[in-house]
Image: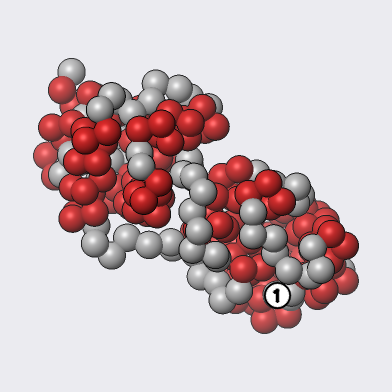
């Protein structure tokens, strides 16, 4: 697919969603990382309702590494999968203290060595915490839009990302990470997409069928 086709899609979505940004609330790179971990199979809205109480008590690697596991589980219970997430939070904090001097690392490779941080999460942290996007975080919205518009016919997030990176210039990574998610939430929904309101329906393979 020609890059100007993809750039036209991105530019139209930027015009449609000029205020698109990350929905998670955070103040430090570590809080960003924890919020992203909690967002797995959970809405950002729910995470934002949960993190104030959590971060009021535990918002540093030292505090979470030393926090009682049961208390972490209780605090993050609304986000689902709380037992596994609480365990990974403690392991992640310990890893940061042991291997990275108490600071969240600033490379994809190092981030992905942290328990609970996969490629999607690492992409989000690199963009939102360090303003240095290295790729495109493929969540359910990005997957759906990429498939519908014809940017990828893959189902695995890693393969979809590779398809996107081949077509989208790096200067657009930040925009794509934001506008694709907003478009998926507001217009190109999983069920009953608002095709008549879609700014890129002319590019959509699903709409043209």
Residue at point 27% right, 33% down? Answer: 3
Percent across and percent down for residue 139 are 48, 42
Image quadrant in which the C terminus is located: top left
Residue at point 74% right, 74% down? Answer: 60
User: Which of 141 and 193 lies nearest the eye of the viewer?
Assistant: 141
- Rendered view: 98 above or below 115: below
| Colour scheme of the picture | secondary structure
Q: Secondary structure at mark 1?
A: loop
Percent across and percent down for residue 44 are 49, 59
Residue at point 35% right, 33% down? Answer: 167
Percent across and percent down for residue 120 are 56, 45
**Residue 10 visible to an observer of this rendering:** yes
Residue at point 55% right, 65% down? Answer: 129
- Rendered view: 70 above or below 120: below
Percent across and percent down for residue 65 are 84, 67
Residue 125, picture quadrant: bottom right
Q: Is residue 31 left or right of residue 127?
A: right
Label 1 environment density (alpha carbons within 10 Å; few <14, some 14–19, many ≥20): many
Q: Is residue 93 left or right of residue 188?
A: right
Q: Which residue is mark 1?
A: 59
Quick one: which residue is furthest to the top in this view? 209
Q: Is residue 24 left or right of residue 207?
A: right
- Rendered view: 9 above or below 55: above
**Residue 69 visible to an observer of this rendering:** no
Image quadrant in which the N terminus is located: top left
Residue 178, picture quadrant: bottom left
């Amino acid at each position: 697919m020609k890059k100007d086709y993809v750039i036209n899609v991105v530019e139209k979505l930027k015009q449609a969603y000029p205020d698109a940004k990350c929905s998670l609330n955070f103040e430090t790179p570590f809080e960003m990382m924890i919020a992203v971990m909690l967002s797995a199979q959970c809405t950002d809205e729910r995470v934002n309702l949960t993190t104030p109480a959590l971060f009021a008590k535990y918002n540093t690697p030292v505090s979470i590494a030393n926090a009682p596991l049961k208390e972490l589980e209780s605090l993050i219970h609304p986000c689902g999968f709380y037992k596994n997430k609480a365990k990974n939070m403690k392991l992640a904090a310990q890893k940061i203290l042991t291997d990275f001097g108490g600071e969240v690392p600033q490379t994809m490779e190092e981030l992905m060595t942290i328990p609970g941080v996969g490629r999607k999460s690492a992409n989000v942290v690199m963009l939102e915490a360090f303003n240095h996007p290295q790729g495109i975080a493929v969540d359910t919205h990005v997957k759906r839009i990429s498939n519908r518009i014809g940017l990828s016919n893959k189902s695995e997030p890693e393969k979809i990302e590779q398809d996107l990176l081949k077509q989208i210039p790096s200067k657009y990574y930040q925009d794509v990470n934001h506008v694709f998610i907003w478009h998926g939430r507001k217009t190109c929904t999983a069920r009953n997409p608002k095709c008549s309101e879609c700014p890129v329906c002319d590019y959509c393979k699903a709409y043209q069928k």
